Amino acid sequence: MEHVAPLSVLALRPVLPHPRAVMKGAGVRPLIDGRDVLEEMHPDGDSSCYQEKWLGSSKTWPLWAAREPRRVELSNNDCETGCCGGVFVTIQRRGDHVEWVSWQNTNDIRVPVPPEVRFDAAQYDAELVSGRS
């Protein structure tokens, strides 16, 4: 029998950039069941989901979930992630659920990454709409 992750709740929290950040725009950090998983995985990282990326069609938003899986950068070191690393997750919509799978922490591979996370698609989409403003 295939293991299915329990449903989690997504919340988005606005954050200010790191004081020495090159990108000075405010960011958005995802909380999963009230936990800031980016703080746990990449405490010195800066959000890659800048508020300016939430303009326009919902299909262009950083955390938008489509049927086609998409690798998304969640945080970085205010640098090119190919150089200094960051946190990535693959986001995909499957029916009434949104899945975050294949987590990667290229900043520090010794830090454990979360298991697969599943969200109710309606709650997820509603949070994206409310969290972008």
Image (cartoon, rainbow, N blue to C red):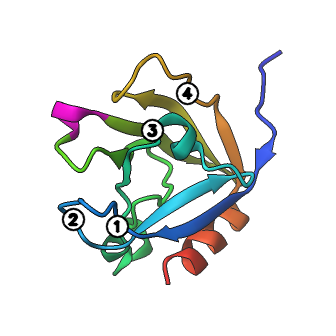
Marks 4/1: CA–CA distance: 22 Å
Q: Which mark is residue 113?
A: 4
Q: Magenta residues: mostly which secondary structure?
A: helix
Precedes in sequence: disc 2 or disc 4: 2
Precedes in sequence: disc 4 or disc 1: 1
Precedes in sequence: disc 3 or disc 2: 2
Measuring 56% from the left and 78% from the top, which residue is drawn there?
Answer: 129
Task: Evaluate if marks 2 and 1 touch, with contact meaning CB atoms under 8 Å apart.
Answer: yes
| 125 versus 96 height, above or below | below
Residue type for callout 4: Val
Residue type for callout 1: Tyr
Residue type for callout 3: His
User: According to the image, label 2 marks what residue?
Assistant: 23
Q: Which mark is residue 42?
A: 3
Q: Residue furthest bottom?
A: 133
> Does 62 sit left or right of 66 as displayed?
left
Please state the horizontal and vertical placement of residue 50, each as a whole percent of the image. Answer: 34, 67
Please rate how many residues cluster around mark 3, counting C-alpha atoms within 10 Å: few if below 14, some from 14 to 19, many from 20: many
User: According to the image, label 1 marks what residue?
Assistant: 50
> Does 93 sit left or right of 76 as displayed?
right
Marks 2/4: CA–CA distance: 26 Å
Please state the horizontal and vertical placement of residue 27, each as a whole percent of the image. Answer: 40, 67
Secondary element under disc 1, as helix, strand or loop, is: loop
Magenta span of residues: 81-85
Secondary element under disc 2, as helix, strand or loop, is: loop
> Does 120 sit left or right of 115 as displayed?
right
Res 123 → quadrant: bottom right
Q: Which mark is residue 10?
A: none
Image quarter in which the N terminus is found: top right
Please rate how many residues cluster around mark 4, counting C-alpha atoms within 10 Å: few if below 14, some from 14 to 19, many from 20: some
Marks 3/2: CA–CA distance: 18 Å
